[in-house]
Image (cartoon, grey):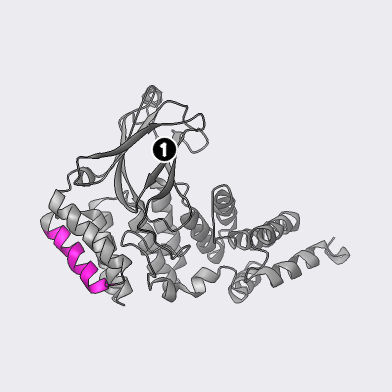
Amino acid sequence: MPIRVRESFRSWRAVPALLTLASAFSFAGARAQSIDIGGDKQNSVPSDVVINVMIDQIQNHAPAGLMVRLEAPGDNSLQGGQQTDSSGRVVFRIVAGVYQVGITGAGIEPYEGTIQIMHTQARDTENIIVRSKSTGASGAPSGPDPVSASKFKVPEKAAKEFQAGSKAMEQKDYGEAKRRFTNATALYSDYAAAYNGIGAAQMAGGDTAGARASFEKAVQIDDSFAEAYRNLARLALADHKFEEVENLLTKSLQGEPLNAWALTYAAYAELQTQKFELAITHARAAHGVAHPGLASVHIVAAHALEATNRPDEALKEYKLYMEEDPNGRDAPRAKQAIASLESPQAN
């Protein structure tokens, strides 16, 4: 039974983005920091970015009153500061790029980190978990979230080269992008984001081996660099190395537990390796966050549920897919599955 489900999933092409992975690496409009499959439009004008702040775990939204500040690397001018609302949320209107984030307030340890905004959607969302001061009492680490010190020492000249590389990526000038990112690493050898950018430019130019080495260098410098782990996972996906995909995405989710792409493809890899319960868990977590363009995560969940003899739950997942993407590539077969599961013979 599990093998049959696995094969039917492959033939059914439940995750269309995987089938167009090669075209996704063309980086149509993508900035160097990411090679996300879910979107291919890039805006150089300001757009809204929602930052959701959670305390200790993703279920605990931060209270109102925490201060969230953004600052561009290598630029001492503060981009702005806002206080969280009652849902632990703030909204900034900024252009695409790399920003340092600082979060402070009563009851939490000061947080510093880096986000990379691409504007691939009408509104980008970033989810950040901070630590409460009380967690130290239970023996858990009570200091600020461990992030690479290299993120906060980027010289201005290196940051300018990085931004120039990002602009070149946006213009699909991959040779120039690689040159600029390489200049950034020459000016600052621990510039993890720049190595990630080099990898993106190399991938766009067809140098898969070089891209892998660059992404690996990025995570060597910063072992919490979720984006670089996702990029490595994309390379593994192209080679159908599903165990490797799962391991890489597990690492990425430690830093960004609410990333919809990582949750979706972790579920897909786990379905392929017949880790059905994990696939269901990650698929449902993906449904719990905004996941535009990733409705097929419900197909993943449905196959895993059928493989574990839970047809009623599988039926719900097929229907969720139809609600989210009624004209999608998998819609005809989802309709067939719904009809089959609802037929008297299925009961």
Q: Answer with left or right where residue 182 lies relative to residue 119.
A: left
Asked whether 33 or 43 is in front, the reply is 43
Asked whether 241 or 23 is in front, the reply is 23
Q: Position of residue 178 (x, y in %)?
A: 22, 68
Q: Main secondary structure of the magenta part?
A: helix
Residue 72, located in which quarter of the rendered image? Answer: top left
Residue at horizontal 46 percent and vertical 30 percent from the top? 62
Q: Which residues are magenta?
A: 173-186
- In which quadrant of the rendered image does the N terminus lie? bottom right
- In which quadrant of the rendered image does the C terminus lie? bottom right
Residue at horizontal 46 percent and vertical 51 percent from the top? 259
Residue at horizontal 21 percent and vertical 43 percent from the top? 152
The residue identified by callout 1 is 129
- Within the magenta stretch, is there residue 181? yes
Up-down: is 30 above or below 281?
A: below
Up-down: is 335 above or below 289?
A: below
Q: Position of residue 122 (x, y in %)?
A: 48, 54
Residue type at mark 1 is Ile
Which residue appears farthest toward the front when viewing the image?
A: 45
Asked whether 104 or 252 is in front, the reply is 104
- Within the magenta stretch, is there residue 175? yes
Res. 62 in view = yes
